[in-house]
Amino acid sequence: MTKIKRRTFLKGAAALSASGALLHHFTSSTAVQAQSSGPAGSTLPARSPLGISDDLFNPTEYSSIDGRLVKTMWMGFNKVILPSGPTILRNFNDSLPGPTLRINAGDTLELAFENRLPENRPDQPTEVNIPNHFNTTNLHYHGFHVSPKGNSDNVYLNIEPGDKFNYVVQVPKDHPAGSYWYHPHRHGSVSAQVAQGAAGMAIIKGALDDVPAIKEAVERVLVIQAPIPGVDGILDSEDPIWPLDAERDFLVNGEYKPRIYIREGEVQRWRILHAGDAQFFPFKIDGLEIYEIGRDGNPLPEARLVEEVHLSPGNRVDVLVKGATPGAYLLRRPFFDQGKQSLPPVHLANIYVIPANDSRVPPGTPFGREIPKGPLPDNPILVDITDAEITHRRKIVLGVEDVKGYFHDTLFTINDEPFDPKRDDVVSKLGSVEEWTLINTTPFPHPIHIHVNPFQVMSVNGVADPDKPWMDTIAVPAAGTVVFRTRFLDFDGRYVMHCHILPHEDTGMMINVNIEP
Amino acid sequence: MMKQFNLSLATGMLAAVLVSSAAVADDPQNTPIPAFGSQCLSCHGEDGRPELADVPIIAGQQPIYLANALRHYKSGERTNGQALVMQEMVKNLSDEQIVALAQWFGAQQ
């Protein structure tokens, strides 16, 4: 009882703090450092893009120099203060979220990765689809069109406690520009680690960035997460993250209900990443205009005024938000049903529209005012896939079974089988172009993500999407269907497709895709 | 009355099924769904009233209509969109099982 009162008190304290500054100063040890550059990568400390001290900070940012981004990344224990109280999370670089990576197409990511977590407890399950070994990890570059092999985007790696591993990820010169992200992807511990906030944004520059109206706008990075601590300290069980309503206190860039400032008449560009573990995050800002300009990093045909933005775990969205009459506005997730599960509203952030000449904003700060009119530039290699191109069609059935002996007696399946790391579920050839129909036989939506190659969404529940958007994560509705098309280009090798409700992935909803040369 | 008439029609057509499902014939509304139909309940609800907004209410629906719908899913005559989900659900059901399920849902009120 005492504990509950203390947590309630702390939650109230965080809500009352000016901007959740309590949180970001605690979690971002680099915040006081000046921008620094090394031979192959610069570091921009976490900061408000408007230079206001109690404004939401963009996360610390690592940028490439002369075609290379060379940095040390690590997974370790990170002390944070969550709305529910102080705790210790498994995070990247002692930071919640991890630093933003910003590179150009054609660059090479050279990340010296260290697993600084302690040894796993000895009593670990040996069954592959029961969550296990929460201190073993790796890195996945979500949405990147890069090699899945060797020391690139290889999610079959087990980087054990104390081990070091050098990732070298060569990003093609014609890689689509956009907002991507990174997170651990070791089957068995991915849900636990992402649920604790191990994730960060990864930006590949170009396309939308060069539109004049967008270029002159202040850019924000918003990483949405709802870290789940262990019951009495470090999370060592899947139980606290298993229920769909386990995520309760949603944060932006590690802050609880932060302030976000916009000047009157200003248009800001927000890159938003949903790095949560399980819950969908539809959101709206009552009283302010939101224009969607890109999904999963890829531009929409034109800027679109939307009432509500829809994100499932793993999705990114690029939006323009316009400051109207000075005053306070609420960024909130309304009440909604995720399949059969009702989920409560979330008050995510407070938006403050301030006078255009607010003296706290330093002179020379960018001030966008326009919503781009007409077509937005597209990523040139993402060309519509025609009927004539299709070389193969597949049916992918998502399911769930009650099986005694598994975690909560549950096995999630794809085509009636739980994940088996040794089995090739899809075998295809480099250069093939396929149409997949995803059929969800469960009463909950599943956001399905495929590595290495993006796909073009053709229809949802049989209704054609006129935009045919290119995405890498798409929610297959409860008792519903999605049809997408994809090209297997440039990279042979094995990789995976899985549900991005990560407890589902860890309990079986993943397949191997083997692209032969 | 109408419902009873329809049920008796279905019953008459399905004597063979009902021999092995005597309890269903006795009091179908209060009888658990046959084991092979348990998968239906996750989307259509324990009593045929779903919690999902885009899944049809089939409690009390005409059994002949339900049986024909299931047959058409199985044969592939009903296709696309959410019909693909139903194709997966019915692919391993026999015609006798289809009729028994149609009768069970039809008897729910």
Image (cartoon, rainbow, N blue to C red):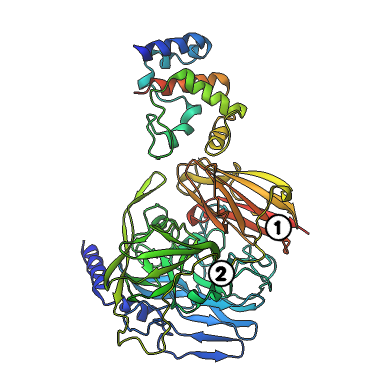
The image position of residue A51, as x and y in percent, is 37, 85
Name the residue beneath numbered marker 1: A488
Apparent side of residue A110 relative to residue A183 in the rendered image (left or right): right
Name the residue beneath numbered marker 2: A178
Apparent side of residue A485 relative to residue A310 in the rendered image (left or right): right
The secondary element bearing badge 1 is classed as loop
Other-residue count near label 2 (Cα within 10 Å), few / some / many at <14 / 14–19 / ≥20: many
Other-residue count near label 1 (Cα within 10 Å), few / some / many at <14 / 14–19 / ≥20: some
Apparent side of residue A4 relative to residue A208 in the rendered image (left or right): left
The secondary element bearing badge 2 is classed as strand
The chain under label 2 reads A
Front residue (pair A345, A209): A209
Question: Which quadrant, please, contains the N terminus of chain A?
Answer: bottom left
Question: Which quadrant, please, contains the C terminus of chain A?
Answer: bottom right
The image position of residue A377, as x and y in percent, is 58, 68
Residue in the image at 53% along x and 21% along y: B68
The image position of residue A460, as x and y in percent, is 53, 46
Location of residue A280 by image quarter: bottom left
Inspect the image, locate mark 1, and give the three-letter code of the amino acid beneath it. Phe
Alpha-carbon distance for marks 1 and 2? 20 Å
Q: Is residue A73 above or below residue A240?
A: below
